[in-house]
Amino acid sequence: MKIVVSSPWTFVFKWIVPAFWAGLWSYLTASLFLGEATATFNVHLWSWYIVKDQPVSWGKWAALGCLVAGGMLFGAVAVPLKRVAVEGDHLLVSNYRREVSVPFSDVLAGGLTGGEISDSPVVELVFRSTTPFGKSISFVPASRETLSLLRARLRPELGAEVDPESEAIAAELHGRGTV
């Protein structure tokens, strides 16, 4: 039985939010460079925004800088996200175009510190060998329960001690098929 451990919002985080953001900032930046809108600086709010009066010459360059910086941020954080599922003794890793099966025995570490899987909003799994997605993948877990399930399944592979509470939660969720 296939159990998805990554968030159902992964597709939105990976594709929709960056596309919407890029479209909005690209339109804003193009409007500034083409002269259809101008930027003004409000000293009281310490921010710049789009209006039709009192132009600031550096506003279009600031918008271009935000567009580039945002693109780099999304490229580093959102685009690498993967959809992760557990099936039998394998992880199914997908980028929504391709799905790859990775055996549990190939998982070297979980989290940024290695060994134990972290509780951070984005979890990184490091593999012993290179997969088509690289030596490591990142995903957003669906919930703490699914993270507990993944921990319980991977704990022997990571060489960590078995936590009875996590193992009980994982067994219950797996038995019910609710994760």
Image: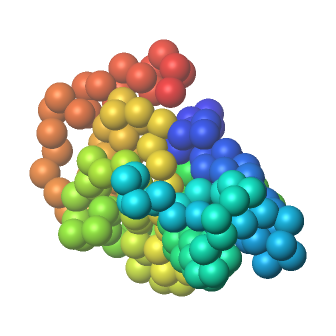
From the top left corner, tell me how far across and down residue 9 is, in percent. Answer: 60, 40
Above or below for 150 versus 75: above
Q: Residue at x 26, y 54 (%)?
A: 118
Residue situated in front as seen by the camera: 87 or 82: 82
From the top left corner, tell me how far across and down residue 71 is, in percent. Answer: 62, 73
Q: Residue at x 59, y 64 (%)?
A: 40
From the top left corner, tell me how far across and down residue 151 is, in percent. Answer: 31, 46
Would residue 120 be seen by someone viewing this image from the given angle?
Answer: yes
Q: Quadrant of residue 79?
A: bottom right
Q: Residue at x 67, y 76 (%)?
A: 60
Instruction: Point out the residue furthest to the front here.
Output: 54
Q: Is residue 164 left or right of residue 36?
A: left
Residue situated in front as seen by the camera: 23 or 139: 23
Indicate how the structure is coloured in the image: rainbow
Would residue 95 be seen by someone viewing this image from the given angle?
Answer: no
User: Count the marks: how many?
Assistant: 0
Specify the quadrant that holds the N terminus.
top right
Above or below for 70 versus 143: below
Residue situated in front as seen by the camera: 171 or 146: 146
Q: Residue at x 74, y 57 (%)?
A: 52
Q: Is residue 170 left or right of residue 93?
A: left
From the top left corner, tell me how far across and down residue 15 is, in percent. Answer: 71, 55
Q: Quadrant of residue 131?
A: bottom right
